[in-house]
Amino acid sequence: RERIIYNTLATPESLDPMGIIVIRLHRWIKIPRIFDLEFLQEDLDIYVDTLTLALNSYGAITLLLTFSILFFSLLVYAFERGEWDVEEKMWVRDSEGVESPFSDIYSCIYFTVVTMTTLGYGDISPKSSAGRIISMVTVLVSLCNITFLINIVGGCFEEVFRDFVLRRSLKMEQEHSKYIKHCLKKKKYRLRGRSSETAKAHRG
């Protein structure tokens, strides 16, 4: 069907396979209308509820993270920017002749965040002993902060998942009780039917 529509609307000069991809994508978007994705919705609800609860607990740790990033960024800026070249009017490290990668505070903040998250891209790195010591201390402090963050998210997930399990258990108990009541009603109707047939047989 997509190919018929595409060949009908498109001209030979404007034929592009991307049109088929767009139409196919439009069909894939309609998949949730066809299939019941209730289980996926429950998982997404757990994920969103966990993040929402974690955000409410991030007040103190966010302030600590912000202070740590700014503090270590200023230290890196102070020890790794190099010396000011009057002629070139820029910060130079170790007579390299090029501008220091730590010549502005924004690059220092970038380096600190990359170091604290233990990514370590390596595009910029300290050369002085003081800068390397600061980087090591930054990693050690960030490990403690990341541990706090993981524990907070883990605790929030445990609380949200416990509540989810309780609600699921309550729902299953209610459905089970409804099923038992339904079976009892059917049994009563059958017994009434049999008793009425027996009574008719005795009368006859």
Image: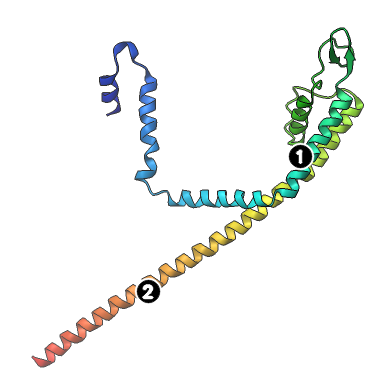
* 193 shown above or below 3: below
Instruction: Give the residue type that dot 2 points to.
Output: Ile
**Quadrant the N terminus occupies:** top left
Residue 159: give x, y in percent of width and height: 62, 59
| Residue at 82% over, 41% down | 141
What SS does tag 2 mark?
Answer: helix
Q: Earlier in the sequence, mark 2 or mark 1?
A: 1
Between 94 and 187, the one lying in front of the other is 94
In the image, taking residue 70 as reference, residue 44 lies left or right, namely left
Badge 1 is on which residue? Answer: 66
In the image, taking residue 70 as reference, residue 170 lies left or right, namely left
Badge 2 is on which residue? Answer: 180
* 96 shown above or below 202: above
Residue 49: give x, y in percent of width and height: 57, 52
| Residue at 56% over, 49% down | 48
Callout 1: few (<14), some (14-19), or many (20+) C-alpha neighbours within 10 Å?
few
The image quarter containing residue 107 is top right
Instruction: Give the residue type that dot 1 points to.
Output: Thr
Between 146 and 68, the one lying in front of the other is 68
Which residue is farthest bottom? 203
